[in-house]
Every structure is written in structure tokens, then in C-alpha cells.
Image (cartoon, rainbow, N blue to C red):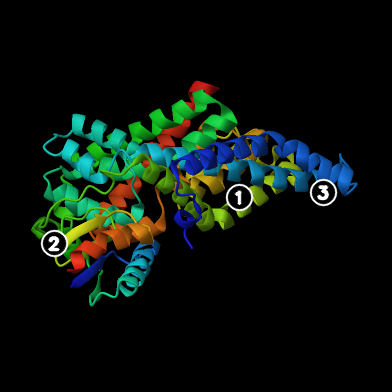
Amino acid sequence: MIIKVLGPGCANCVALERVTREAVNALGLSASIEKVEDYPTIAGYGVMSTPALVVDEVVVISGRVPTPTQLRDLLAPLAS
Amino acid sequence: MSIAELLPTSKRGQGLALVGLGAAWVTAYWVNGWAWDRLLYDGLRMERAARVSETIHFFLYDTTKIALLLVGIIFVVTVLRSYMSVERTRALLGGKREGLGNVMAAGLGVITPFCSCSAVPAFIGFVAAGVPIGVTLSFLIASPLVNEIAIGMLFSLFGWQIAALYVVAGLSVAVVAGWVLGRLGVQRWVEPFVFETKLGGQIIDSTAGLTFDQRLQMGAEEAVTILRKIWPYLLVGVGLGAVIHGWAPTDFFTTYAGPGNVFGVLVAVGIGVPLYSNAAGIMPLVQALHEKGLPMGTLLAFMMSVVALSLPEMILLRRVLKPQLLAAFVGVVATGIVAVGYLFNLVLA
């Protein structure tokens, strides 16, 4: 599973990366987490509000930092 | 530890927490002045009429008041705005022509939840969806210029007329500035990669499908996040306000920027543009200067220039706008703000 955190490096982007790492560890997923910071690529995903989360090339969250619980609920079914 | 984990999970618990916090807010706002009176004058036996104790009282009272207002306003506004999103705004603006498009974009700029850190992807997304550059700029100007915190604060501190004037003035600047920039044929001053970016993927609406509980939670989190981020600005703003309130001679500011000085608004905007703060930090200063006899038009122009044109946002926008357009952007918006200042000084005189 490839998870990408989209965002130019603002405070919320850092927060999203942190909760994502926590959720991945908590769920015991084998996933690589990448940061995407350049604007053309971010916009290429159709994302207009950062931060955003892309799981296996599908945008699952945009414009907000989810709570750890929300994120675990979101990632758990995608793991299989 | 995030706010979400501190909140009760049952429906009933959440309702009780909401009512309890609401009541606590109202009580705190109500007893604010009285409590500091008791503490400073009765508890610490400070002299009531002395300048130092008055300045300290002003500082404590105003910090509490503005922090309370801020939390209340951010919470309500975030919950209300969670029903809008940049994605929906773009859908509404797609295919609109200049003119009506500028008016709509400015209005949507006020009600759409938008962080200036998203200015670049939003700009690319709007342009790729066929929204004209001038219309996109109207949105990007209105969003910080007509600041929801400033509206709430002006309403609480100066009444609804001033708040309404501020909204109308800010919208007019955004509409006119966006339209003028569009007329200048600014396409050639946009970085070419913007036009080459193809939108892939599917559009995720950032706030669609949330439950009301989640929206309340977003409001609470936003209030805490913003307060945590801006408290230094708030303290500096109230501190300056307190010093001006207690120590500045009455005619000090009126000589330089008072009703009699034709250049007052220009001076205010000239100081305001490079200054970077936010609406909450600037408001105590505006209040103290108003007390000292500065006209409202000058003060609104000052406030707008501080919140609308900030260096960090300019640096971000430089990624998509060439220097010529960035300069035109600052020039047109500053001119609009100056015009608004003079107009208000005339109208309110």
C-alpha cells in the first residue's frame, strides 16, 4: 500500500503526516508513506485544499486533518 | 492528545458538554470586567484611578474579552462554513463570465472555508476548471480581506453598521480589483505550468457527508488551533492597545492621521501593508486608536491592509503569478483599500 501526504509543508500537512504514521503503526499495515510537496503534482490529483491523503493513487481526504479514529476507520478496510 | 479524544462519546454527553461550555462562555463574558475589578482593586489593593493600574486592567480585561470573542466566533463560523467547500465554490464559478463572476467569487470568498496555505492548488484548480483569472483573483482577494473574525469583532465592539460597512467595502474592493486585473489581460503573467496542469483523479469534497457532531468537533478543534497559533499576536495587539489607551497623548495620533490630515488614510495603509498580523491581533489596536479620535475609515483601511496583503501569502502566490502580476495585485488591492478609507471618512464624518 502506498500512502501519499499531499501538502506544501504547512502546519496541517505535518499534522496529517503524523496521524497517518500513527494510524499505520496502530493498524500494523505495511505501507510506504511519501510526501508530495510540488504544486503541479498536488493539483494533478484534483486536490484544491491541502493537506490531502492519497492511498494507492485514490484521494481519500482533502482539506482537513482527520482525527486518529476517523483515519483508522478509513484505512482499516483499505488494508486487505 | 487531540480535542476529539477529550469529548464525551455518547449523544447525551455531547449535548451536555455543548450546553455546559456555552453557559461557561456566557458567564465568563458577563463577569469579565467585574472579576478583574475585584481582583485588582479589592484583592491587590491597586489604586483605581492610577494610570498603571488602569493600563493593567485594560490589558487583562481586553485579553479575556477578545479571546472569548475569538473562540465563540471561530466555533460558530467553522461549523456554519463546513457546509461550504472550495470544491463546491469552484463548481459554482465554473463557466461564469467576468462581471457577475467577480461578484459571485467575492461573495463565495467570504463564506468558503479557505486557508491561504491552499492558495496555490486552489488557483491552479480554478484556472484548470475554466474560471477566468480575474474571477479567481476576486475570490483570492475577498477570502482574507473580508475576514469572518474581523466581522464578528467589529460587530461586537462597534455595532452592526460598522460591520456591514466593512463587508460591503471589502466585497467591493475584491470585485473591482479582480475585474480590473482581468481586464489588464493578465494571462501572460501567470506561470505557464498552471495552464499545462491537467486535473486527474476524482474531486473529493472536503466537507461533504460529515455528521453534525463532526462539524461541531471541527469547530472546537479550529478554535483551539487558531488560538494556539495567534496568542502572541493577540497579546502584542492588546498590549499596544493598553499602552495607547493609557499613555498616548490624545492629540498624538490625530496630528498625524486624524480627520484633519488629508494623508491620514495613505499613511495608515502604508504602515499596514508591510505589517503582518491577523484580525484578532489588530482589533484591540483599532479600538484603542478609535478612542484616541482616529476616524473609522482610516482605521478600517489600516485593518484591511494588514489582513489582506501579507508577505507569506505573496510568497506563496509568486509560485503561480509572475512578479508583474503580483505587483499589479498588491497595487490594485492597496488602491482599493485607500479609496474605501477616504470614502468612509467622508460618509461617516
Check disc 3 and report the residue beneath it.
B52
Q: What chain is tagged by disc 2?
A: B
Q: Is residue B64 visible?
A: yes
Does residue B119 appear to the left or right of B335 in the view shown? left
Mark 3 / mark 2, whichever is N-terminal:
3
For the residues labelled 2 and 1, the Cα–Cα distance comes to: 40 Å
Confirm or deny contact between disc 3 and disc 2 (CB under 8 A). no
Check disc 1 and report the residue beneath it.
B237
Callout 3 secondary element: helix
Question: Observer-nearest residue: B257 or A26?
Answer: A26
Residue at 37% from the left image edge and 46% from the top image edge: B214
Q: What chain is tagged by disc 1?
A: B
Q: Which mark is residue B73?
A: none
User: Where residue A16 sits: x, y (%)?
Assistant: 34, 64
Q: Quadrant of residue B134?
A: top left
Residue at 62% from the left image edge and 39% from the top image edge: B24
Residue at 29% from the left image edge and 39% from the top image edge: B84
For the residues labelled 3 and 2, the Cα–Cα distance comes to: 58 Å
Does residue B95 appear to the left or right of B266 in the view shown? left
- What amino acid does circle 3 point to? Val
- What amino acid does circle 1 point to? Gly
Callout 1 secondary element: helix
